Image (cartoon, helix red, strand yellow):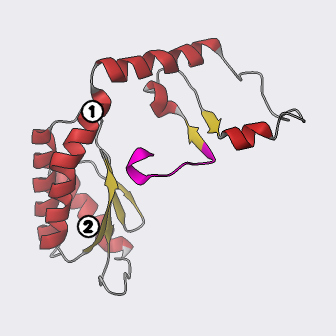
Amino acid sequence: LDAFDVRPDLITFAKGVNSGYVPVGGVIISEEIAATFDERVFPGGLTYSGHPLAAASIVASIEAFEDEGIIGNAARVGRDHLEPGLLGLAAEHPIIGEVRGTGVFWALELVEDRTTKEPVSAALMGQLKTELVSRGLLPFTSDNRIHVVPPAIVTGDEVRRAVEIYDAALTAVGR
C-alpha cells in the first residue's frame, strides 16, 4: 500500500497470510466502514469465523516473515533482479506489451501489437507455455498474460535463470 500511496476501504486476504498451513481468510476494513456498524450489527459470521488456530497461524506466520526477512527479500529481489530482468525482456521482445508489478508479484502482458494492445492468440500462449515447461519453468498463464510470481524467498540467481528461460522461450516462438 505504501508503494502506491493509497488508503483502501477494505483489504481481503486468504491462505498466503499464513503460508497455507490452516485454511483462513479475512477482510480488513477502514475505520469509516467499521463506524457504520456502531449503530447496527454486522449481519455476518459463520461457524468457523474467528477460529483460534487460524488466527494464531496468521500471527505466527507474520512474525516468521518479519524475523526471517522474507518480506525484505521479496522487495529487494523484486527491485534489484525481477523488475530489471522483466523490463529487459520487454526491450528485446516486442510481444511484451506491458510489464507490471512490484516485489515478487509481476505480470507480462503479451500482445500482437504494442499500439493496439491486441492480445496474442491462445495458440501462441500454448506454444510459449510448452517452450517454458520444456526448459524447466512451470508458468502461471491466464489469457494473454504470464504471471511471474516466484516465492518470496527466491534468490537473485534464481530470478536471473528464470529470465534467461523466458528469453529463450520467447525467442523460440519467434517473438
- Residue 141: x %, y % from top left: 36, 57
**Residue 5 seen by the camera:** yes
Question: What is the three-letter code of the residue carrying label 1?
Answer: Gly
Q: Quadrant of residue 125?
A: bottom left
- Tag in front: 2 or 1: 1
Residue 50 sits in which quadrant? top right
For residue 61, which quarter of the picture?
top left
Q: Say which residue label 2 marks.
A: 127
Which residue is more in the foreground, 79 or 119? 79
Taking the image as shown, residue 93 lies to the left or right of residue 138, namely left
Amino acid on which disc 2 is placed: Gln
> Percent from the top left, x then y, of residue 67?
31, 17
Magenta span: predominant SS is loop
Q: In the rendered structure, which disc, 2 or 1, sits on the residue that comes first in sequence?
A: 1
Q: Secondary structure at mark 2?
A: helix
User: What residue appears at the point 34 percent right and 55 percent down from the top-left corner?
Assistant: 101
Q: Say left or right for 35 vs 156.
A: right
> SS for tag 1?
helix
What segment carries the magenta color?
1-10
Q: Quadrant of the C terminus?
A: bottom left
Instruction: Tell me: residue 12, above or below residue 70.
Output: below
Asked if residue 7 is among those painted magenta in the image, a careful observer would answer yes
Residue linked to disc 1: 72
